[in-house]
Image (cartoon, rainbow, N blue to C red):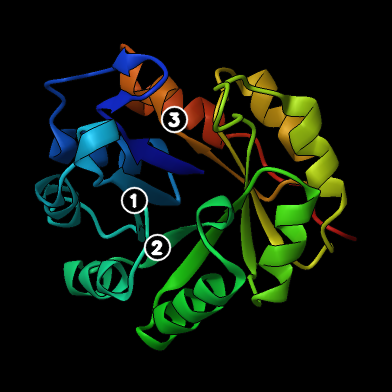
């Protein structure tokens, strides 16, 4: 379970304008999250470096710096901030950029969540050496959530790749669907941020355990 600190989204506007990232991070940890994603992009998501630092100072969980990684400085900034991982969006990068940024991130001691939306992007992720692949159910152009497409992309990936289902997960049943399709993890933001009792909501989602090979 990767729980996300998310103030707003391009598709839905403000989710929680005045959220306290430190309090949210502690709720996530109490609820059993395995890692926390922190949006730092300001233009589209109203995130910031200060949000990341507040979370970092409030938890010992691994942190994903979630932003549009488009240059080496983005990677070096993430490392300096204390990130455990960075986001690489295949649709936003050329093959050479993807490979170079992946290598730079690992050289800095960080993992990469390599995000894809279709089978072609999944193949490009594998070619750069990705070991953790996030499959975003939301179309970047229409913002529509399409679970069936995400399941098809998951089936195209080797079993040894760690796969993360992203976007549109609103219930335990949604998480169970992803688990049954072979996903290893889910990334949830809006549902947790809007929850009345965040820790309890995270605990319910986290209770879904992935299938393990015999």
Q: Which corner quadrant of the image does residue 162 belong to?
A: bottom right
Closest to the observer: 88 or 159?
88
Residue 20, percent from left and from top: 13, 31
Q: Which residue is mark 1?
A: 67
Residue appearing at x 25%, y 41% in the figure: 25
Viewer-side label of 1, 2: 1
Instruction: Please say if the residues under marks 1 and 2 sit with CB atoms less than 8 Å apart.
Output: yes
The first of marks 1 and 2 along the sequence is 1
Left or right of 76 on screen, residue 138: right
Q: Quick check: 103 above or below 21?
A: below
Q: Which corner quadrant of the image does residue 48 belong to?
A: top left
Label of residue 86 in the image: 2
Q: Secondary structure under badge 2?
A: strand
Residue 138, percent from left and from top: 59, 29
Viewer-side label of 3, 2: 2
Q: Secondary structure under badge 1?
A: loop
């Amino acid at each position: 379970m990767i729980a996300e600190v998310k103030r707003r989204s391009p598709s839905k506007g403000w989710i929680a304008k005045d959220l306290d990232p430190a309090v949210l991070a502690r709720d996530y940890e109490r609820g059993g999250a395995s890692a926390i994603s922190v949006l730092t992009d300001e233009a589209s998501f109203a995130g910031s470096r200060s949000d990341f630092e507040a979370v970092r100072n409030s938890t010992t969980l691994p942190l994903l710096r979630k932003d549009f990684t488009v240059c080496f400085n983005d990677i070096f900034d993430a490392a300096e901030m204390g990130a455990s991982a960075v986001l690489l969006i295949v649709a936003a990068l050329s093959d050479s950029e993807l490979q170079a940024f992946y290598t730079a991130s690992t050289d800095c001691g960080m993992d990469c969540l390599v995000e894809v939306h279709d089978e072609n992007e999944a193949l490009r992720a594998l070619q750069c050496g990705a070991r953790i692949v996030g499959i975003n159910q939301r179309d970047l152009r229409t913002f529509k959530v399409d679970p069936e497409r995400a399941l098809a992309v998951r089936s195209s990936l080797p079993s040894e790749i760690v796969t993360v289902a992203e976007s549109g997960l609103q219930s335990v049943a949604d998480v169970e669907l992803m688990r049954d399709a072979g996903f290893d993890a889910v990334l949830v933001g809006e549902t947790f941020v809007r929850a009345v009792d965040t820790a309890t909501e995270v605990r319910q989602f986290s209770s879904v355990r992935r299938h393990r090979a015999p």
